[in-house]
């Protein structure tokens, strides 16, 4: 099923994250436990069945930064992606508002891009692809 067909079936915020990154997956597991997480859909871009084009995403870019398709169907990346997640979680709405303030967002953006550059060099989780 492609993204446009799936979009008609649910109005969830789709989060595209690196499931082999310890920090990334830890954070997504945290969000899954929170009130409001039923409005989020977690898509592990390292899963063997993930195909970026099914969601109209660039396969190279989705590997470089967190991507979110918000409830209105807009693509948001990096810090804007986190803001979309936080806007969906009742306990994080104030965090989303603070993160949206220009000076705060600028600092967060610098930090996020620094992390994104080193993320590929960090230790990865074990591969989940079963042996045949």
Image (spheres, rainbow, N blue to C red):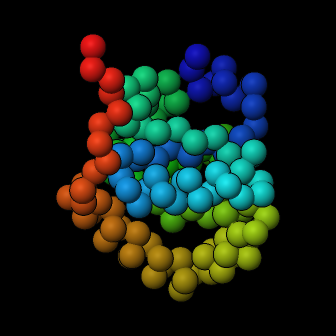
Residue 119: quarter of image = bottom left
Could you tell me residue 50's position as x and y percent?
43, 28
Up/down of 78 relative to 45, above or below: below
Residue at the image point whose x is 38% and y is 76% from the top: 110
Residue at the image point whose x is 31% and y is 71% from the top: 114
Q: Quadrant of the N terminus?
A: top right
Name the side, left or right, on which 59 lies relative to 32. left
Pick the residue in front: 93 or 102: 93
Residue at the image point whose x is 29% and y is 42% from the top: 126
Name the side, left or right, on which 67 lies relative to 62. right
All told, the count of numbered labels is: 0
Pick the residue in front: 4 or 27: 27
Could you tell me residue 13's position as x and y percent?
67, 45
Residue extending farthest left: 121
Could you tell me residue 99's position as x and y percent?
60, 76
Pick the residue in front: 14 or 21: 21
Residue 93: quarter of image = bottom right
Name the side, left or right, on which 94 lies relative to 58. right
Residue extending farthest top: 132
Residue 132: quarter of image = top left
Residue extending farthest front: 131
Up/down of 50 relative to 111, above or below: above
Up/down of 87 relative to 72, above or below: below
Residue extending farthest bottom: 103
Could you tell me residue 112's position as x and y percent?
40, 69
Residue at the image point whose x is 71% and y is 58% from the top: 34
* Residue 27 visible, this angle: yes
* Residue 72 visible, this angle: no
């Amino acid at each position: 099923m492609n993204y446009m067909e799936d979009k008609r079936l649910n109005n969830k915020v789709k989060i595209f994250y690196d499931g082999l990154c310890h920090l990334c997956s830890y954070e997504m597991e945290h969000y899954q436990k929170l009130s409001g997480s039923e409005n989020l859909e977690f898509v592990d871009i390292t899963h063997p069945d993930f195909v970026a084009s099914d969601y109209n995403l660039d396969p190279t870019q989705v590997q470089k930064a967190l991507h979110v398709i918000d409830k209105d169907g807009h693509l948001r990346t990096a810090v804007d992606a986190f803001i979309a997640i936080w806007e969906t979680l009742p306990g994080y709405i104030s965090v989303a508002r603070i993160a949206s303030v220009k000076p705060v967002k600028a600092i967060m953006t610098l930090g996020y891009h620094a992390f994104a550059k080193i993320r590929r060099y960090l230790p990865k989780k074990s591969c989940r692809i079963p042996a045949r």
